Image (cartoon, rainbow, N blue to C red):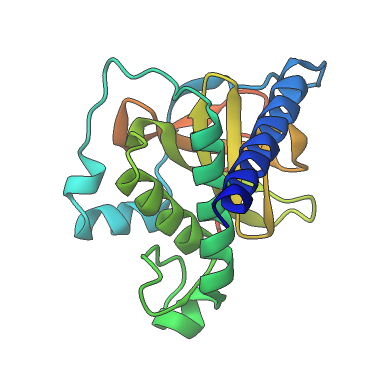
Amino acid sequence: MASSMGWRRKAQGLGLAVALTAFCVAAGSAYAAPVSMVVGGSTSQPIGHYDFCKIHVAECSIRSPNNVPEHMSSKLLHDISAVNLSVNKRVKPMSDMDNYGKDEWWAYPDNGFGDCEDYALEKRRELSSLGVPVANLLMTVVRKTDGEGHAVLTVRTDKGDFILDNLTDKVRLWNQTSYRYLKRQASDNTGHWVSILGGDEQLVSSVK
């Protein structure tokens, strides 16, 4: 039994190492966009996040002036993959109107239901509790190929920006998705947002 458990641990470690190597190879490949987003200046805060911050004041008042991207390791890869999968499985999709009786209401899905930004908020909360600095856990607004607004969580690392998305259980580099990236939380101030250069700068009026 002990030798069998040891073999399984080695196999799991090897699997993570292979997955991490695949990520790093992808990060070094030639894509149209760099592996890390290029951000611009301050931009408008999504109304849903603005209302969220009125309730969760402390969470939107964190300053990280000397932040650096998180070191990508097998542990971090395991954690972000596990949290993405776990939250996607546990939370059931439901619109803000059906869930809360109003549009654009960002909240933790404590009742087991939520839409895209609620999934992202929960993943941010859980990864923060595992020790990932909030400076590297950034709520991000994108546009899908059909033009609909969407929210994901960006995990900022020294191997690039990885996306945790309720529409897929696979964690991917941002330049491996089909989205157009609009804006995200500033890494040095959780209450501020910055534009993403090269993305569609048009304000997303609805993030479903």
Residue at point 44%, 78% (across, down): 112
- Frontmost residue, 26 versus 107: 26
Q: Quadrant of residue 84?
A: bottom right
Residue 124 x %, y %: 41, 49
16 vs 155, left or right, is right
Residue at point 23%, 28% (across, down): 63
Above or below residue 20? Residue 11 is: below
- Frontmost residue, 127 versus 151: 127
Above or below residue 156? Residue 100 is: below
- Frontmost residue, 57 versus 78: 78
Above or below residue 105? Residue 169 is: above
Residue at point 49%, 36% (across, down): 75
Residue 156 x %, y %: 50, 29
For the N terminus, the image quarter is: bottom right
185 vs 205, left or right, is left
Residue 161 x %, y %: 58, 29
Judge whether residue 204 can be spotted in this image.
no
